[in-house]
Image (cartoon, rainbow, N blue to C red):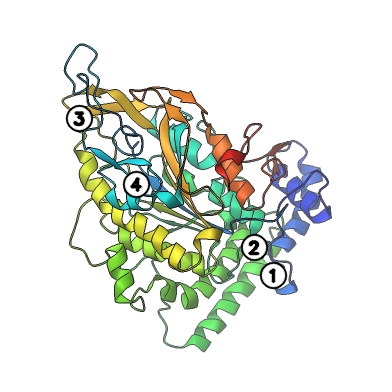
């Protein structure tokens, strides 16, 4: 549901209901809540709030696959490599340290990328690289939440929840927002929470492996018996709700139960890679023997493509948890294994989407919470650095082979075209046909949005 400057009756009711829990006037709000609860349960009447909804203007992209590298990837050693010449090897009083891993340029577009990412370097002609990103905070949890929700300090809905709320889902048998994560990152479940948005817009977490969603398979052998059981539970839930007509959270949970029931048929097929041809498995490195942090990332990337094909609106891939990760304070060589685990699958995802004819309508976003210092910390590590770092976007109408922004010769500050997190969010929403200033939700007496009161669409990144 996208609320414009002139909300209709249904949108106005939803906004009042959302703000009523924090309102001082509980008498007035109690008159509104039963009607809103009824709307949450109106799917059989064709009024399902998860159904696809119109955009503000024609969209370039209809899906997002966000890859989040937990811990703060060093831009200096990856996508903004800096020279190790002139004493930048940790010697000298300034303790400057350049890229430790070497680098080369993409043969077609000339974008320079570290040797940590040789596969991604090969597809940089499909990638729009931002080297002048500025983090919202210098600590992990706050910066991670800032990248996901736009707010480093207050609980706010995740970007995936905002996209689900604004556009709905194209597949009623799967959630509109799915997070594939072996472990939780800094910020915990808040990175995919819906907060004050309706609960069914929160992310559904999937854990890579043989049982990605627990308890998905019915314990019974008869589908008809399960149908009867579900109808009985639904009747009890509705009776329970009848005694609590103001509980929109309960209504949202009931809607989630219906989605979970439908997922028993759709999800196992989406997560089953046995039908994928051998050349695709080799492209992603599904059967490679490399083990370590994020070793199932090939599975995550291939499943992400399959989910996007099946109409899931927003898919996030988190490579590792709060430890071990890219937070290389003591030794930058920790980046090697982490990069090796994600490099080939990440590049394969872009290549596969392009071969499938999906890249034009799918944005692949690679991000981390902040960069790392140009000076060394400890023996050969780096500290947190918020003033500049790199993110990139492939597909979805972004310029391939384009580099936006520039940092100084040691990678400490942006010298041109600095980009805030709100600017990135505004641009991603724009490519999905959403005006970031009109995607609002009324809560606690004010209209909230992903970009708060900030954000500019960066048209210079768009083709």
Q: Disc 1 to disc 2, how far (Cα)? A: 9 Å
Q: Helix, strand or loop at disc 1?
A: helix
Residue 295, above or below 46: above
Q: Which residue corresponds to mark 2? A: 50
| Sequence-first disc among 4 and 1 | 1
Q: Are marks 2 and 4 in contact (CB under 8 Å)?
A: no
Q: Which residue corresponds to mark 1? A: 43
- Nearest to the eye among marks 1 and 2: give it: 2
Q: Are marks 3 and 2 in contact (CB under 8 Å)?
A: no
| Sequence-first disc among 3 and 2 | 2
Q: Are marks 3 and 4 in contact (CB under 8 Å)?
A: no
Q: Which residue corresponds to mark 3? A: 330
Instruction: Estimate how packed mark 1 is, as few (under 14), some (14 to 19) or many (20 or more) residues with alpha carbons within 10 Å.
Output: some
- Where is residue 236? Give x, y as percent: 61, 71
Q: Which residue corresponds to mark 4? A: 106
Kindly identify which numbered label has been placed on residue 87.
none
Q: Residue at horizontal 26%, vertical 53%? A: 341
Residue 426, above or below 139: below
Q: Are marks 1 and 2 in contact (CB under 8 Å)?
A: yes
Q: Are marks 3 and 1 in contact (CB under 8 Å)?
A: no
| Sequence-first disc among 3 and 4 | 4
- Nearest to the eye among marks 4 and 1: give it: 4
Residue 64, above or below 418: below
Q: Helix, strand or loop at disc 4?
A: loop
Q: Residue at horizontal 77%, vertical 52%? A: 11
- Where is residue 414? Give x, y as percent: 45, 25
Q: Helix, strand or loop at disc 3?
A: loop
Instruction: Estimate how packed mark 2 is, as few (under 14), some (14 to 19) or many (20 or more) residues with alpha carbons within 10 Å.
Output: many
Viewer-proximal residue, 376 or 208? 376
Viewer-proximal residue, 453 or 213? 453
């Amino acid at each position: 549901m996208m609320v414009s400057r002139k909300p209709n009756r249904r949108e106005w009711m939803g906004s009042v209901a959302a703000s009523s829990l924090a309102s001082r006037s509980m008498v007035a709000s109690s008159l509104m809540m039963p009607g809103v609860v009824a709307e949450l349960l109106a799917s059989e009447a064709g009024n399902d709030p998860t159904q696809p909804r119109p955009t503000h203007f024609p969209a370039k992209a209809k899906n997002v696959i966000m890859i989040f590298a937990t811990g703060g990837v060093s831009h200096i050693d990856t996508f903004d490599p800096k020279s190790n010449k002139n004493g930048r090897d940790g010697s000298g009083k300034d303790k400057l340290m350049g890229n430790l891993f070497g680098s080369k340029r993409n043969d077609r577009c000339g974008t320079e990328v570290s040797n940590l990412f040789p596969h991604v370097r090969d597809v940089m002609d499909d990638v729009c690289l931002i080297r002048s990103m500025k983090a919202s905070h210098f600590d992990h949890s706050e910066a991670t939440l800032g990248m996901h929700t736009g707010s480093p300090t207050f609980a706010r809905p995740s970007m995936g929840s905002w996209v689900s709320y604004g556009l709905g889902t194209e597949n009623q048998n799967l959630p509109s927002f799915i997070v594939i994560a072996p472990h939780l990152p800094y910020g915990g479940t808040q990175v995919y929470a819906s907060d004050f948005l309706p609960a069914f817009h929160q992310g559904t977490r999937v854990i890579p492996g043989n049982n990605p969603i627990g308890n998905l398979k019915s314990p019974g052998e008869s589908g008809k018996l399960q149908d009867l059981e579900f109808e009985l539970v639904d009747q009890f839930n509705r009776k329970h709700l009848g005694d609590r007509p103001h509980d929109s959270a309960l209504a949202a949970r009931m809607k989630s139960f219906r989605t979970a029931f439908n997922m028993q048929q759709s999800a196992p097929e989406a997560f089953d890679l046995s039908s994928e041809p051998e050349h695709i498995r080799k492209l992603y490195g599904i059967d490679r023997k490399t083990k370590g942090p994020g070793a199932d990332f090939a599975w995550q990337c291939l499943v992400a493509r399959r989910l996007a094909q099946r109409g899931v609106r927003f898919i996030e891939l988190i490579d590792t948890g709060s430890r071990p990760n890219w937070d290389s304070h003591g030794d930058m060589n920790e980046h090697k294994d982490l990069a090796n685990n994600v490099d080939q699958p990440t590049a394969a995802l872009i290549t596969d989407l392009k071969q499938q004819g999906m890249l034009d309508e799918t944005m692949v976003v690679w991000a981390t919470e902040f960069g790392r210092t140009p000076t060394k910390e400890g023996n050969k590590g780096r500290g947190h650095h918020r003033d500049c770092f790199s993110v990139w976007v492939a597909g979805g109408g972004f310029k391939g082979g384009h580099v936006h922004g520039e940092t100084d010769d040691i990678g400490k500050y942006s010298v041109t075209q600095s980009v805030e997190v709100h600017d990135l969010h505004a641009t991603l929403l724009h490519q999905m046909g959403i005006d970031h200033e009109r995607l609002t939700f009324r809560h606690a007496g004010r209209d909230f949005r992903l970009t708060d009161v900030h954000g500019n669409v960066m048209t210079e990144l768009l083709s």
